[in-house]
Image: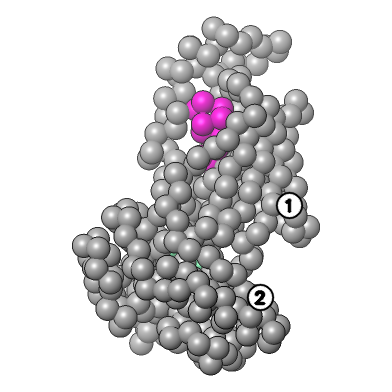
Amino acid sequence: MESTKKGGKLDKYTFSMHNARMSYAQQVHISSKVCFVQAYAKINLALDVLGRRTDGYHELATVMQTIDLHDTICLTATDDNRVHMICTTPELSNDENLAARAAYLVRERLACTQGVRIELYKRIPTTAGLGGGSSDAAAVLLALDQWWQLQLSPSDLLNMAASLGSDVPFFLIGGLALCEGRGERVTPLACYWPSSMRWLRLLKPAISVSTKAVFRNLPASDYTDGTHSRAASTALNASQIPDVNHLHNGLERGVLERYPEIAAAREDLLKAGARFVRLSGSGPTLFAPFAELARAFQVQQQLQAQGYEVYLSRAINPNAGSVCFF
Ligand code: C5P
């Protein structure tokens, strides 16, 4: 990290009332009291589980795309040297929230005591397979880097993101990407999204699924060699529609078998008119692409009448970390 170099620069403009060692980090330069950032959800277009690793994680190859369903985060500078986490989902208003952990991590790495209040307006359903918590954490890392003018290097940000969760590095970049390893090796793909998938109908069954349990219960017979994600990536990179057989999720079979509610929701989506339905990540959220809004909307009305929690979204390539200051 470049803290020593910038420490000198910033120390010229700030002074400490204390005897403590003064680093640039303890005296972060904040030009504004408030900053807003949006955190987008993702879907997995393809997901291969290659096998179990010695560290307990699984080796993956997955194609992820950010979608316009998003949380909104407001960061406010405080004078009390603390991190306060306030979330519209009350059970997430605590220091375990990945967004709070991201702020603690930045402060710890840079020996920084700047206080911050994190207000999180949650729209992305939680433990849904849509990466909401990971996206919130990446958004906080990117926002603090810009807002506190930390100029963290890409590898600093990547290491911090990977230490918070396997999906967090993807959200530093967003858009369409092939993610490998534990998920932290992110290769951005050309911004191409098939018009046949213009509208994404999401259905979140009313159950929670533990990612840990899904991976733990995955039999080796569901492992694949990465062919699906690589083929989907190659096609998309060449602005071609991937073969539907490659839009494969290696976690789906086991999840549908273990959770009949998700299998029933999948059937209802198909009955309502979806031609193609996939699980996102470890679920429980299912997505169905549509070329036309009218058709997607018709399906929504039918599913809502059946009492399902549904969302209409689309692929989006946000400027990762586009932060708004006040
Ligand atoms: O990295 P993260 O904390 O998001 O992962 C949640 C859980 O999912 C891990 O504790 C692990 O059990 C499982 N996982 C895995 N292999 C991956 C990613 C996640 O086994 N590549």
Q: Which residues are magenta?
A: 141-150
Q: Quadrant of residue 185?
A: bottom left
Which residue corresponds to mark 2? 309
For residue 87, the mark is 1
| Outermost residue, front side | 294
Between residue 146 and residue 222, name the one nearer to us.
Answer: 146
Question: Looking at the picture, how far across and down is residue 200, in whole percent?
Answer: 49, 70
| 307 in relation to 200, above or below | below
Out of 296 and 237, give the one closest to the viewer: 296
- Quadrant the C terminus occupies: top right
Q: Is residue 205 visible?
A: no
Query: Does the stretch in magenta take in 168?
Result: no
How crowded is the residue under tag 1: few (<14 C-alpha within 10 Å), some, or many (20+)?
Answer: some
Q: For residue 32, say whether it is visible.
A: yes
User: Please, which colouring scheme is shown?
Assistant: one colour
Tell me the element at label 2: strand
Please, is residue 285 above or below residue 134 in the view? below
